[in-house]
Amino acid sequence: MRVRRVRSADMANVIALDAHVTKLPKPDYWTDVFRRYGKQRLHERFFLVAEDRAERTRLLGFIIGEVRAWEFGSTPCGWVFALSVEPELRLYGTGSALLDAMSAEFKKAGVSKMRTMVARDARLPLLFFRSEGLMAGPYIQLEKDLD
Amino acid sequence: MRLQISTQLAIFAVLELAGREGEQLSVADIGEKYGVSSHHLAKVMHVMGRAGLVRSVRGAGGGYQFAGNARRTTLLDVVQLFEDLNSVEQDGGAADAKPEGQALRQVLSEIDDIARATLGSITIATMRKLADRHENGGRQLKAGPPRPRPQRPGNP
């Protein structure tokens, strides 16, 4: 397996994987994400893909993150906001490899903390991030209905 | 959050057993490590046996084995055998119907939900790694022993 930056040629596979996992095809959204995270401010935005070394056209998974500092009083941190692995290929280390590669990019960008946000009932990603050593952070997510 | 002694013992026992795949440990072995009576621990193991988390092995050298999947069994699976995680209980008193009573229940429900989500997100394998991290003096979680991963067919 090899993890590298995304290329425009990967996007059809990224869109297909996301549609397969979420059952919600959204090509326009991914085209926009590629424009912002695959082409701009690449020193602090990272859109990485994992591919099979032997079968290079095969996308195993992808991860997207950026250096952010928008919470109240937060110092910059590495924020992971997307991670997806081909369902049949899970439990073979692809997610770990993607997260390791993202950690390395964040470190190179000068941050020492990685964060993400996962829904309480999203069991699979929660189990994954926990197994990778992520613990509850010092922020509490709050929300309200806008009447 | 405070856990009962039985709950803590159950977690410790599962961690011990899950860390020794294929081996069995006696109640006395586990009790000795954590300084608890075999009698108390036997009751805990009985509850976990009925829930399918451990299995007893009879005969010479018998004891208990972990019967679950350490990467799928969570702390919640163990804790809820011994604890009532619902702190919000309506006792039918007058306060329940008051706005203040409803507001308090809402806040306590939020706490319960967070506790459940936390316990439900940490597997026995993750706990094992956390414990190893403490044993190694707080080094990074991933610096612990590598976890076994299934190999993809054709990929060594």
Image: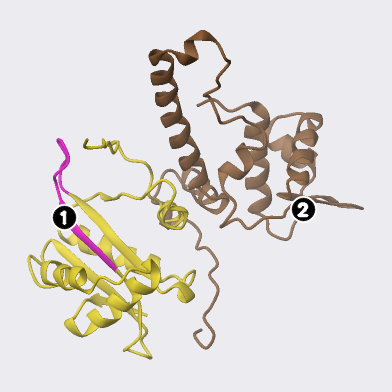
Chain colours: A yellow, B brown
Q: Is residue B115 above or below residue A47?
A: above
Residue drawn at point x = 55 percent, y = 49 percent = B128
Q: Magenta segment range?
A: A63-76
Camera-side residue: A66 or B93? B93
Q: Which residue is mark 1?
A: A67
Dot 1: chain letter: A
Residue B116 at x, y percent in the picture: 50, 38
Q: What kind of residue is marked 1?
A: Val
Return the residue nearer the eye: A110 or B137. Answer: A110
Question: For residue B24, which numbered disc appears in the image?
Answer: 2
Quadrant housing residue B47: top right
Q: Residue at x 42, y 19 (%)?
A: B102
Left or right of residue B63: residue A122: left
Q: Secondary structure at mark 1?
A: strand
Q: Is residue B35 visible?
A: yes
Disc nearest the viewer among 2 and 1: 1
Outermost residue on the right side: it is: B59
The image shows residue B130 at horizontal and vertical percentages of 48, 47
Q: Residues within 10 Å of mark 2 (few under 14, many from 20)?
A: many
Residue A61 makes an appearance in the image = no
Label 2 chain ID: B
Residue at mark 2 shares a chain with residue at mark 1: no
- Disc 1 crowd rating (10 Å Cα; few below 14, some 14-19, many 20+) is many
In the figure, residue B48 lies in which quadrant?
top right
Mark pair 2, 1: CA separation: 47 Å
Are the residues flagged by discs 2 and 1 in contact, CB closer than 8 Å?
Answer: no
Q: What percent of the width, then of the height, locates residue B105? A: 45, 22
The answer to whether residue A101 is above or below residue B109 is below
Residue A81, position as x, y percentages in the image = 26, 57
Residue type for callout 2: Gln
